[in-house]
Amino acid sequence: MTATSQPSLLALDGRTGADRVLLGGKAASVERMRRLEIDVPPAFVLTTAVCRRFYDPADGDGSVPSDVWAEVPAAVAELGRVTGRTFGSGDRPLLVSVRSGAAVSMPGMMDTVLNLGMTEAVRDALAAESGDPEYASDVWRRFHEQFEKVVGEPAPADPWAQLRLAVAAVFRSWQSTRARAYRRDRGIPEDGGTAVTVQAMVFGNVDDRSGTGVLFSRDPLGGGAEVYGEWLPRGQGEDVVSGRMDALPLAELAGSMPEVHAALMDATRRLELDGRDVQDIEFTVERGRLWLLQTRAAKRAPESAVRHAVSFVREGLITPAEALDRVTAEQVETLLKPRVDARAARSAAVLATGKPACPGVAVGTVVTDADDAQDQADEGVDVVLARPTTDPDDVPGMSVCTAVVTELGGSTSHAAVVCRELGVPCVVGTGAGTVTSLGGRVVTVDGTAGVIYDGALPTASPASSSDPDLAQLTEWARAETGKDGSLAELLRAR
């Protein structure tokens, strides 16, 4: 099917019938939640077919096609009708988020632009509506700073011009250096394209009964069955994901707004059962009302991948073959790698401590710049990247490091999530000034305990291949392949 014969714009109402390839991951997530009748801010998507036209010399000219753009005002008006707000004007103004989303999630795509549609009149209207000029000024500041950083130019005064520029920036990000490199390294086709999701804003920073958070339906580190997440009162989603602000344990939400927490747990259970996998969920609470923004299969550490794969089979949610699909040979090998020797750790100097974000042990020289990390890794140096926080620009450097350390952020921050995908030991939230104090030193990073030691420490014996879950996976793999061998060998042979 050609791009021009596929839908260009779809309202995400839970009934589109479109697949992830056309909708992209973020819009498919919204569509799925709407289908399950979970509260999600209304949204529409410019599909991946539009991205292909954007780059087609016979159809596009590197801008949003005019016939597609002609459909956008009606779609935005529908967001306004549902929310009772008006885009870019009025006493109850509508602001929107603009998000990239390819069929396969990849670092390198454009960051989200929040609070789009902001003007001076809108700022004043938000101040009047909320009764809090500081909140309105905060939204104004956030929008202008983020728009210029992500889109690459100052935001124009006209909301429609803001929207068109942001949409075009998402499509351009498909061909960013980072995105191209990621696709090349993982064999992802070049012609897929990204979709653009435009969604009505909800505000976690509006009052004391508002906030934002990220949770995993099960522990993505150690593999436990308990819900694992963080909550930031009076924040917006990027505050948690970026790691710029230290969030609170999810239990704090249960204490302050138990009815919201109960609704969140109910939605989490429903999404996990529907997806038959551990879910990574972003949510916002606005004036005491829960809104879910995104759900997806969670990135997980190697031990967690093994534990959850076996648990889901035991619970009757997946088959043994599906469990084997969810564990890689590399994850098994990581789990079987040595750990920090306990006796050596007791006598070693501890340089910093933080939150364990991805388990494992690594030794390397601390570098504080992602580009320098790449250069030194190319020269054969084992490098530990230490940053205040990480963002998508740092991913190429993170991917060649032995470990990553950040001063800020929690276990749902960008650094934590990316390192779990890469299988790189990671410690986050070590405190301001850590980067400066560690630069140039040889350290041992214990991503399991959340400790950075001075020097290169010896290691102890790893987990045994007789571990019950590893043994169970090995039994399933041998039954499926009809071969003998280690679990890693059998997984590679499938």
Image (spheres, rainbow, N blue to C red):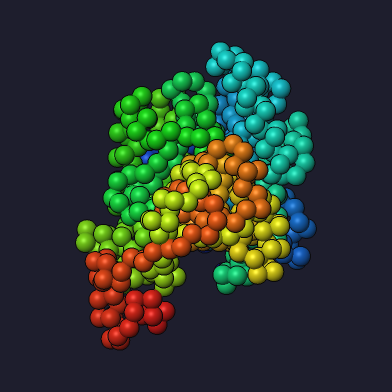
Can you give x and y, in whole percent of width and height, for residue 42 in the image?
49, 38
Q: Nearer the viewer, residue 391 or 467?
A: 467
| Residue at image coords 25%, 81% | 479
The residue positioned 69% from the left and 20% from the top of the image is 121
Which of the two residues, 254 or 135, is positioned nearer the viewer here? 254
Q: Residue at x 30, y 46 (%)?
A: 226
Work out which quarter of the rendered image holds the N terminus and state it. Answer: bottom right
Of all residues shown, which one is farthest toward the front? 347
Q: Quadrant of residue 40?
A: top left
Relative depth, front residue between 252 and 33: 252
Residue in the foreground of this view, choosing between 2 and 306: 306
Residue 383, percent from left and from top: 61, 60
**64 sits left or right of 101 in the view:** right
On the rendered image, what quadrant is the C terminus found in? Answer: bottom left
Tell me: residue 118, above or below residue 440. Answer: above
- Report if residue 233 is visible in the image: yes
- In this rendering, is residue 6 above or below 81? below
Quarter occupied by residue 131: top right
Query: Would residue 327 be found to the left or right of residue 91 on screen?
Result: left
Q: Residue at x 33, y 55 (%)?
A: 223
Residue 24 visible in rendering: no
Tell me if residue 211 comes above or below residue 109 in the rendering: above
- Residue 62 position, x and y percent, is 76, 56
Quadrant of residue 85 in the image?
top right
Please state if 26 lies on the left or on the right of 251 as rendered. right
What is the total number of numbered labels drawn onto the structure image?
Answer: 0
State whether residue 311 is above or below residue 42. Answer: below
Direction from residue 215 to residue 66 in the image, left or right: right
| Residue 413 drawn at (x, y percent) | 51, 45
